[in-house]
Image (tube, helix red, strand yellow):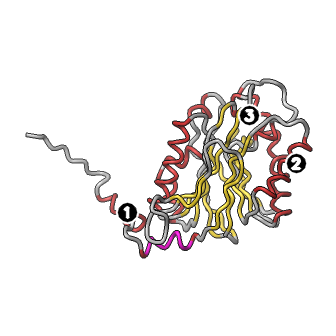
């Protein structure tokens, strides 16, 4: 299976034709069975012919208004290239409020979504976002796929639940505005690959947009992570891009081979996970005398 993790450059575009051209260029840059775009990639639609500056909440409202237009272009891309695409994420309206939503789209037009379960403090306090209400696994011709958007990847129980439900890969669209945030997400993605002995694919947002506080500065590095075990890279990195270098990192991967250490590996993180429960409620205080 060929997967493209796109370090997607966000920018102000003059007219919808410019956004269409950007999607067309992606076809050449990222030929793959699955194309993964980052968190807040859908802000590109909100930035088309946008005013110089808005408040963060107004940017969120504008992006939610443009979500359908963004998804239409992603669906056309998937259909045109006979591939699946994770169309990144963006603000979307629900009856409970605006969520940060990731859209997974198939070549025949099927679409499903995963809402971010744990918003960051910025998303809660500044954007007024609400958390998603369920964790999902997507049954596709490419296998069972889970999505953990950025901060969600930093919570191991989510990945564990997906792996127990049969996830063969976990996609991590991310958006971080500094090296510390990027380190947290990247290292968490690598940890999730070790714990669940599965493939984790991270796609970051890169670039700067003056006047749009939601995506004013973005740093990241695309990466494909696996358990460092027999038959796989010793550092657990199948492929990666350069930091802040826009473009696609394309890798041919076999999720089955990546999962094989669950049965034949040097360690059994996936199988031994439940042994933690023997100890998680028992912390013994011992005086040092």
Q: Does the magenta stretch include residue 164?
A: no
The residue singled out by tag 1 in the image is: 274
Q: Residue 85: percent from the left, percent from the top?
A: 74, 58
Q: Tag 1, which secondary structure?
A: helix
Residue at disc 3, secondary structure = helix
In whole angstroms, how far apart are the C-alphas of marks 3 and 1?
40 Å
Residue 263, percent from left and from top = 43, 75
The prevailing secondary structure element of the residues shown in magenta is helix
Q: Report the residue marked by disc 2.
A: 21
* Disc ID at residue 60: 3
Which of pointers 3 and 2 lies earlier in the amino acid sequence?
2
Report the magenta residues as a range. 256-263
- Report the Cα–Cα distance between label 3 and label 2: 24 Å
| Residue 142, visible in the rendered structure | yes
Could you say which quadrant of the image residue 58 lies in? top right
Residue at 77% x, 33% y is 61
- Count every numbered label the image shows and give the total: 3
């Amino acid at each position: 299976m060929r997967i493209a993790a796109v370090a997607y450059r966000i920018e102000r575009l003059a007219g919808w034709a410019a956004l269409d051209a950007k999607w067309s260029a992606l076809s050449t840059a990222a030929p793959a069975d699955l194309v993964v775009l980052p968190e807040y990639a859908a802000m590109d639609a909100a930035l088309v012919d946008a005013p110089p500056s808005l408040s963060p909440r107004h940017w969120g409202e504008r992006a939610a208004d443009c979500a359908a237009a963004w998804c239409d272009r992603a669906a056309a891309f998937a259909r045109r290239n006979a591939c699946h695409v994770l169309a990144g994420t963006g603000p979307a309206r629900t009856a409970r409020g605006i969520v940060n939503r990731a859209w997974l789209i198939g070549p025949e037009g099927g679409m499903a979504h995963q809402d971010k379960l744990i918003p960051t403090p910025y998303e809660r306090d500044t954007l007024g976002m609400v958390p998603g209400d369920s964790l999902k696994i997507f049954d596709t011709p490419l296998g069972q796929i889970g999505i953990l958007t950025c901060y969600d990847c930093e919570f191991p129980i989510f990945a564990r639940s997906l792996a127990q439900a049969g996830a063969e890969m976990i996609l991590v669209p991310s958006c971080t505005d500094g090296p510390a945030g990027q380190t947290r997400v990247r290292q968490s993605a690598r940890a999730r690959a070790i714990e669940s002995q599965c493939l984790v694919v991270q796609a970051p947002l890169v670039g700067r947009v003056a006047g749009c506080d939601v995506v004013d500065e973005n740093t990241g590095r695309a990466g494909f992570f696996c358990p460092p075990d027999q038959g796989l890279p010793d550092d657990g990195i199948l492929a990666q891009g350069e930091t802040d270098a826009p473009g696609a990192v394309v890798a041919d991967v076999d999720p089955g081979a990546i999962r094989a250490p669950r049965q034949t590996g040097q360690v059994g993180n996936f199988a031994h996970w439940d042994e933690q429960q023997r100890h998680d409620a028992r912390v013994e205080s011992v005086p040092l005398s």
